[in-house]
Image (cartoon, helix red, strand yellow):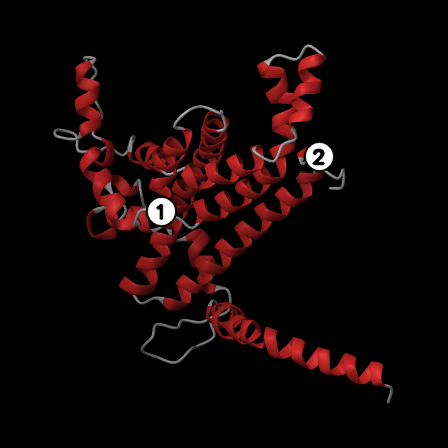
Amino acid sequence: MTKRSLRQKQEARWGFFFVAPFLIGFVLFMFGPMLFSLIGSFTDYNLTSKMNFIGLNNFKRMFLNDDLFWKSLYNTAYFTIFNVPLTTLFSIFLAVILNQKLVGMRFFRTIFYLPAVLSGVAVYILWMQLLSPSTGLINTILSWFHITGPSWLFDPNWTKPALIMMKLWSAGGAMLLYLATLQNVPTQLYESAEIDGAGIWQQFRHVTLPMITPIIFYDVITSTIGSFQIFQEAYVMTSNGQGGPANSLLFYNLHMWNKAFVGFDMGYAMAMSMVLFMIVLVLTLINLKLAPRWVHYAGGDQ
């Protein structure tokens, strides 16, 4: 055996040694639970009895007999369809505004980023106070303009818009990513566009927007996944985590939680988790498939 091959084997051993904690953690805390959920989705497991194989009964029950399944899926899809584009556009808008070279801009960047690092439960309780129909600050401000504010969390027609508005308030995390990307856009591109007679809007459309499309792509994928996993907001902001008035805030994960940890119908909840996994996987693959059509990279590769 040559010295080179011996050295390569030693390097390989050390490489496996350093990645072993990740591999062990992945098997124990990700792949293992996913495999257990996949197997459990075909059983009637309820924490108190052994798993009995029941085939596709959980899925048949889900699609044919559980009206709340479709209600929760509708609520989650509604939230995702509006939340993802609105938060993305608002984050880009904030980043463009905060990218200006003005006095005190660092202070404003910090202010807009702070909501992204605040504790979730504390923020939700704060928003419950702000959205109070009678004493909330939002309806109080609307009353100054002689506008009768809605009941927000007590009106099924306004519960989901209220949560979307709350999510817009915490768009500072994505804003920071866009801001970092904007500051790396070469100034020569703007100078060339200005020489060619491009105005502010043309510069944004033909220079800024193409340069930040990789971050938009990343943000859309992660925001879509996060929106389909919404749970904590509805659990904290509704009575006993039951989904609010007329189940208007009964999101998919909240319904799955109730099945698993309130009704102890673990097999059914595992089946729901598999359906959610497939939905998110399909949407992610669609995004990846469409990405080469609109995502532009500095090196020209897609």
Identify the residue at horizontal 46%, vertical 62% (top origin).
271
Q: Secondary structure at mark 2?
A: helix
Name the residue that disc number 2 marks: 293
What distance separates the C-alpha of mark 2 from that of mark 1? 34 Å
Q: Position of residue 284 (x, y in %)?
A: 59, 47
Q: What kind of residue is marked 1?
A: Val
Q: What kind of residue is marked 2?
A: Arg
Q: Are marks 2 and 1 in contact (CB under 8 Å)?
A: no
Q: Secondary structure at mark 1?
A: helix
Q: Position of residue 115 (x, y in %)?
A: 33, 40
Q: Quadrant of residue 20?
A: bottom right
Identify the residue at horizontal 23%, vertical 36% (top origin).
153
Q: Position of residue 225 (x, y in %)?
A: 49, 48
In the depicted view, which residue is nearer to us: 258 or 134? 134
In the depicted view, which residue is nearer to us: 189 or 209? 189
In the depicted view, which residue is nearer to us: 184 or 235? 184
Q: Is residue 263 above or below residue 15?
A: above
Q: Position of residue 131 (x, y in %)?
A: 21, 33
Name the residue that disc number 1 marks: 117
Q: Residues within 10 Å of mark 2 (few under 14, many from 20)?
A: few
Residue, far left: 135
